[in-house]
Amino acid sequence: MTIRTIVTVPEAILRRKAQPVTKFDEKLQTLIDDMVETMRAAPGVGLAAPQVAVSQQVIVVEYPLDDEDEEAKPKLFVVVNPQIVKTSPETVNGIEGCLSVPDLVGEVERAEEITVKGQNRRGQPVRIKARGWLARIFQHEIDHLNGVLFTDRATRVWKPEEPVEDNV
Ligand code: ZN
C-alpha cells in the first residue's frame, strides 16, 4: 500500500465529475487500499478518489456507525459508484474541514439522515443508512465525486485558530 498525495485547491480534478467504475480489477483494489492508507495517514475520516487525483467514483469513510455511542469503534466503509437515494427533510448545521481545502473550515447545512446505495470493492450491491456526522461525511465525499467542495455550500467560511479534527 502506498500513501498517495492529496491534491488541494485549485487543482482542476477537484472540479471534475468523476467517472463511474465499470471494472472491479486489481487496479481498483490497489486504489482502494491506497485511499484507506492515505486517509488514515492524513489523518482523516473520509476520502474521495479525486482527492488523490483519480477521477473515478470511489469513496472511503472510517467513522463509527452510531456517533452517539461513545464506545462505538470506527467502521470502514468502501463505496464504489455511491448514490444518495434518500435524504431526510431534517437538516443540521455543522463545521466541516476538507483535506483538499487546507486551513479553512465552514458551516454547512446537511441532511441529518441519508441512505447511500452503491457497490463494494468486489462489485456487490451495498446499501448504507447513515445519520448524524456519518451522514455528513458521506454527503461531503459524494459531493467530491460531483466536483463540489464544502466551500460552495457553506454559509460562512473562516480560518480556524486551532487545526480541525475529522477532516474529510
Ligand atoms: Zn473533502
Image (cartoon, rainbow, N blue to C red):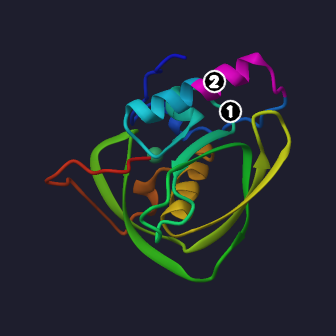
Residue that mark 1 sits on: 56
Above or below, comparing residue 108 to residue 42 in the picture: below
Image: magenta residue range: 23-33
Q: Is residue 49 above or below residue 71?
A: above
Which residue type carries mark 1? Gln
Q: Which type of secondary structure does the marked residue at label 1 adopt?
A: loop
- In the drawing, does residue 131 fall left or right of residue 128? left
Q: Depth check: 36 or 27 in front?
A: 36
Farthest left residue? 161
Disc 2 is placed on an element classified as: helix
Residue extending furthest toward the front:
71
Instruction: Name which of mark 2 and mark 1 comes first in the sequence.
Output: 2
What percent of the width, then of the height, locates residue 116?
A: 71, 59
Q: Which residue is pictured at 16% across the width and 51% down the height? A: 162
Q: Is residue 129 in view?
A: yes
Left or right of 125, for residue 115: left
Percent from the top left, x then y, of residue 58?
66, 38
Q: Is residue 120 magenta?
A: no
Mark 2 sits on what residue?
31
Quadrant housing residue 28? top right
Residue nearest the observer in this picture, 67 or 99: 67
Rendering coords of residue 114 (x, y %): 65, 68
Is-magenta flag for residue 24? yes
Is 64 left, or right, of 156 in this rendering? right
Question: Circles 2 and 1: CB distance less than 8 Å?
Answer: yes
Viewed as shown, does residue 81 lie left or right of 164?
Answer: right
Is any atom of residue 13 visible in this view?
Answer: no
Question: Please, is residue 166 above or below residue 114 in the view?
Answer: above
- What amino acid does circle 2 point to? Leu
